[in-house]
Structure formats: structure tokens, C-alpha cells
Image (cartoon, rainbow, N blue to C red):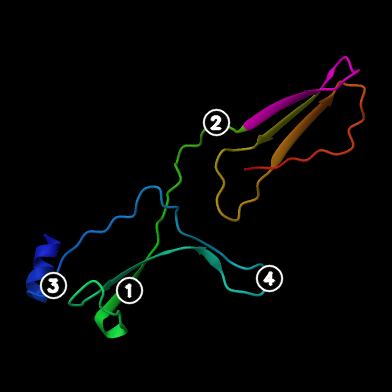
Amino acid sequence: MVSERLMKKLGPNAFPFFFELPPSCPASVTLQPAPGDTGKPCGVDYELKAFVGETAEDKIHKRNSVRLAIRKIMYAPSKQGEQPSVEVSKEFMMSPNKLHLEASLDKELYYHGESIAVNVHVANNSNRTVKKIKVSGK
């Protein structure tokens, strides 16, 4: 086993350990500022820091510690699922018919930087005039 060979090589002061990110932790991502924006990139990264000391309360210094950057990667499924869509109808007072709106995406999964096309179909069977429609995602 790799850890046994490493322990032999490093000697009696080596201490193996196991570390696992909880499944509920979000995947790593870095958002770059748009052209013309100022500031540093922001996102989610993880860092494992280990140190050697007599007690857990000892001060951590560069000479007695090591840091390891960890990126949690999430793989997208290779098989596409069902095309997301939603329908909603609205009734108005004093109008015999409804306003019907249907919004759908052309596919279920999008990759970073890929454009998302939203198809919207409005059927205004009411006697009201529609001045504005707002579509938002979660």
C-alpha cells in the first residue's frame, strides 16, 4: 500500500491521516471579474492546513505547517435529461379568458460560459393588454 511505503520512507515522526470533504460542500468555482472591472476573482476553494506542535493550542508558523489547496470537482452527467419547462396561466377580473405563458430551455445542462437560450411563448386570450413580462431563474 502507498501509505505504508511512505511511512517507512518518512520514519517514525510521520502520521498518516484521512480527510474527506462532506458531500454537501459546493464544488470549487472561480468567478473572474469582467473586462474593465477592478478587483480579484472570487469563488469557492478549500485549503487543508496541517501543523506540528506539542498541543493543539500551539501557534502555527510557516516552519511547522504545510498547506494544500483542494478543488472539489463535480462532473456533469454524460446523458442529457428532460428539457426544463414551466407553464403558468393568469386569470383577470372581468375577462372571460386567461393569459397563458410557457417558458422552456433548449436543453437541461449548460457548461460554464455557454449561452442559455430561453424560449417564451405567450398566449394572451384575455381582453387585457400585456405591457411587460419578466422571466427570472433560480
Q: Earlier in the sequence, mark 3 or mark 2?
A: 3
The residue at which mark 2 appears reads as 82
Q: CA distance from mark 4 to mark 1?
A: 32 Å
Instruction: Point out which mark residue 35 bears.
Output: 4
Q: At x 76% / y 23%, what residue is drawn?
A: 89
Closer to the N terminus: mark 3 or mark 1? 3
**Quadrant location of the C terminus?**
top right
Q: Secondary structure at mark 1?
A: strand
Q: Which residue is mark 3?
A: 14
Three-letter amino acid code at the position of disc 1: Arg
Kindly indicate whether the residue at mark 2 contacts the one at mark 3 (C-beta within 8 angstroms): no
Q: Which mark is first along the chain, 2 or 4?
A: 4
**The residue tagged with tag 2: helix, strand or loop?**
loop
What segment carries the magenta color?
85-98
Q: Residue at x 42, y 51 (%)?
A: 74
Q: CA distance from mark 3 to mark 4?
A: 47 Å
Q: Quadrant of residue 135?
A: top right
Q: Nearer the viewer, mark 1 or mark 2?
A: 1
Name above or below for residue 74 compared with residue 51: above
Three-letter amino acid code of the residue under disc 4? Pro
User: The disc labelled 2 sits on which kind of residue?
Assistant: Glu
